[in-house]
Image: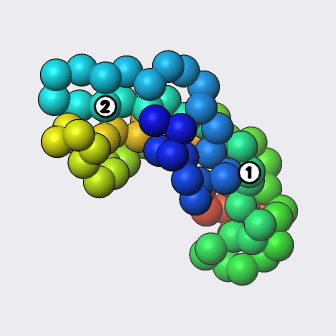
């Protein structure tokens, strides 16, 4: 199961990998903030704005859905005030 995180270096495992009857659930945390605002392009000028949970479905493994539960830190651009 270690290869589940292959290519996702910015994500770190925070919980157990839970394998249920129809789904494999992986709890992760995103550690790196964005390098620039995708809206205005301003480089890394953010302040903290809470947390958000994002669920991403990955390719099936062993005929089970793979659900990545990602805890993300939200931030807000100081220039254009867009929340990321």
- So how many labels did they put on this image? 2
The quadrant in which residue 14 appears is top right
- Mark 1: give few (<14), some (14-19) or many (20+) Cα within 10 Å: few
Q: Which residue is mark 2?
A: 24
Q: Which residue is mark 1?
A: 32
Compare marks 2 and 1 and give the one earlier in the sequence.
2
- Mark 2: give few (<14), some (14-19) or many (20+) Cα within 10 Å: some
Q: Residue at x 33, y 39 (%)?
A: 67
Q: Secondary structure at mark 2?
A: strand
* Quadrant of the snapshot with the C terminus: bottom right
Query: Which of labels 2 and 1 is toward the front?
Result: 2
Q: Secondary structure at mark 1?
A: loop
Q: Nearer the viewer, residue 14 or 74?
A: 14
Q: Is residue 45 above or below residue 24?
A: below
Q: Is residue 77 above or below residue 17?
A: below
Residue 15 location, x and y as percent?
Answer: 54, 21
Residue 18 location, x and y as percent?
Answer: 37, 21
> Is residue 14 left or right of 69 when viewed as pictured?
right
Q: Is residue 21 above or below residue 61?
A: above
């Amino acid at each position: 199961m270690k290869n589940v995180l292959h290519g996702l270096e910015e994500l770190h495992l925070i919980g157990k990998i839970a394998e249920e009857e129809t789904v494999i659930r992986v709890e992760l945390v995103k550690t790196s903030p964005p390098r620039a605002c995708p809206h205005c392009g301003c480089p890394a000028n953010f302040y903290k704005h809470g947390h958000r949970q994002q669920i991403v479905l990955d390719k099936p493994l062993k005929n089970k859905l793979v659900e990545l539960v990602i805890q993300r830190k939200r931030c807000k651009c100081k220039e254009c005030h867009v929340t990321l």
